[in-house]
Amino acid sequence: MLGAADAELAVTYDKTANTRMVRASKMKDGADGVAWVFQLTSVDLGCSLEDGERHTSLVVTDATRVYDRQSKAKRTWTPHRTNARDALRLALEASSTRPVDWEGTESCSLDAWRTAYFDLVPLGESLQGVELRQATNTRSRNFANAVEWLTAEKLVRVEKKNSRSEYSLVDGG
């Protein structure tokens, strides 16, 4: 029945790191090989009214998308990825009161980065209605995918500052 499946997911467990990985080994309408590493954390559900016993369950925590480092397609620079990196540079320059330090000490919010990307990749002025909505959604999706790729490839660093994520270039990006 494997040939009749729309999707096949493989889950593995690394006991030494206490992490699990789910990998899409087959996707009918998507990319094969997409994977996430995650941990399971036990949570207390309280006492059952029926038997008075305490119950627990597992929840997924620290889920992170991973890429197959052997795949050249995933490491290829695309125009969207280049624009996202360039937009981050612009956002870092705009948020800085002094020349940007490319050693990675400057950072900006995702909103500032997104705004710089949207300025760098404008929509056509003639677009209206459904076309404008589709172009807006596509541009947003391209930005999100580029951010995910840049962080997964460790070209962009994400740090928590004052309970919000800040983004910076790694080694000048």
Image (spheres, helix red, strand yellow):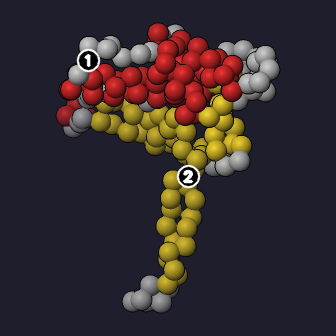
Q: Residue at x 39, y 27 (%)?
A: 141
- Mark 2 sits on what residue? 61
Left or right position of 120 against 124: right
Distance of label 1 from label 2 (alpha carbons): 41 Å
Q: In terms of secondary structure, where does tag 1 sit?
A: loop
Where in the figure is residue 172, as x and y percent of width and height?
Answer: 72, 14
Which quadrant of the structure image shows residue 100?
Answer: top right
Q: Quadrant of the N terminus?
A: top left
Where in the figure is residue 29, as x and y percent of width and height?
Answer: 26, 28
First of labels 1, 2 by sequence position: 2
- Mark 1 sits on what residue? 127
Give 129 or 141, whichever is nearer the viewer: 129
Left or right position of 23 against 66: left
Q: Hey, what amino acid is under mark 1?
A: Leu
Q: Residue at x 26, y 17 (%)?
A: 127
Q: Residues within 10 Å of mark 2 (few under 14, many from 20)?
A: few
Instruction: Say if residue 81 shows up in the picture.
Output: no
Which quadrant of the structure image shows residue 139?
Answer: top left
Where in the figure is residue 149, as x and y percent of width and height?
Answer: 53, 24
